[in-house]
C-alpha cells in the first residue's frame, strides 16, 4: 500500500527543491554517479533521484543518508540548532510582568516601618 506524500506548501517546496539541487551539485563536484551514491547509501537510484529533485515524499532518513555519503552529515546538526524565537518566548514567560513588579514593590514598601529607628532613646 503506497502512502500519500505530505502536503507541502509552495515556500516549503522551494526549500526542499533547493536542498535537492545543492545535493546534486555536491555529488557532481565529487564526480560521483547516482548509482555510486545509491550503493553507498544503501538505497535505490530512484531514491537518490527523488532527493535531488526535492521530492517531499522522500524520507528525512533518505536525505540524511545522501548527506552522509557526500560527507555533509555534520550540516544536519545545524538544522534548528539556534531557536531564536523559542528562546525569546521562553524568556518572556520567565520574566515577571510589569504588574507583578509593581505589586512586589508596593508590598515591600508597605511592610517597612514608617520610622526606621525602633530603639527608644533614653
Image (cartoon, rainbow, N blue to C red):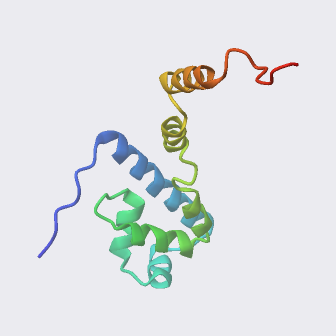
- On screen, residue 63 versus residue 72, left or right, reads left
Q: Residue at x 58, y 69 (%)?
A: 73
Residue 28: horizontal and vertical position, in percent? 56, 64
Please identify the quarter of the rendering in which residue 70 is found.
bottom right
Residue extending farthest right: 122
Question: Compared to 22, does 84 lie above or below?
Answer: above
Apparent side of residue 73 relative to residue 66 in the rendered image (left or right): right
Taking the spot 40% from the left edge, 52% from the top edge, the residue there is 16
Residue plotted at (50% across, 61% down): 24
In the image, taking residue 83 as reference, residue 15 lies left or right, namely left
Residue 118 placement (x, y as % from top left): 76, 23
In-front residue for pair 64/36: 64
The extreme front residue here reads 122
Residue 23 rendering spot, x and y as whole percentages? 51, 61
Up/down of 12 relative to 39, above or below = above
Quadrant in the picture for residue 116: top right
On the rendered image, what quadrant is the N terminus found in? bottom left
Whole-percent x, y for residue 18 in the image: 45, 49
Q: How many marks?
A: 0
Above or below, 116 relative to 25: above
- Residue furthest to the top in view is 114
Residue toward you, 104 or 83: 104
Name the one closer to the observer, 103 or 22: 103
Q: Is residue 120 left or right of residue 14?
A: right
Residue, x 50% and y 74% (percent of image)? Answer: 33
85 shown above or below 116: below
Q: Quadrant of the C terminus?
A: top right
Amino acid at each position: 500500500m503506497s502512502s500519500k506524500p505530505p502536503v507541502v506548501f509552495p515556500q516549503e517546496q522551494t526549500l526542499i527543491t533547493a536542498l535537492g539541487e545543492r545535493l546534486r551539485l555536491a555529488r557532481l563536484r565529487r564526480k560521483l554517479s547516482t548509482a555510486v551514491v545509491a550503493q553507498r547509501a544503501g538505497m535505490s537510484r530512484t531514491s537518490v533521484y527523488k532527493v535531488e529533485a526535492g521530492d517531499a515524499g522522500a524520507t528525512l532518513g533518505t536525505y540524511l543518508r545522501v548527506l552522509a555519503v557526500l560527507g555533509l552529515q555534520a550540516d544536519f546538526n545545524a538544522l534548528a540548532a539556534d531557536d531564536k524565537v523559542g528562546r525569546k518566548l521562553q524568556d518572556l514567560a520567565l520574566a515577571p510582568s510589569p504588574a507583578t513588579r509593581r505589586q512586589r514593590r508596593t508590598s515591600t514598601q508597605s511592610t517597612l516601618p514608617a520610622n526606621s529607628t525602633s530603639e527608644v532613646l533614653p
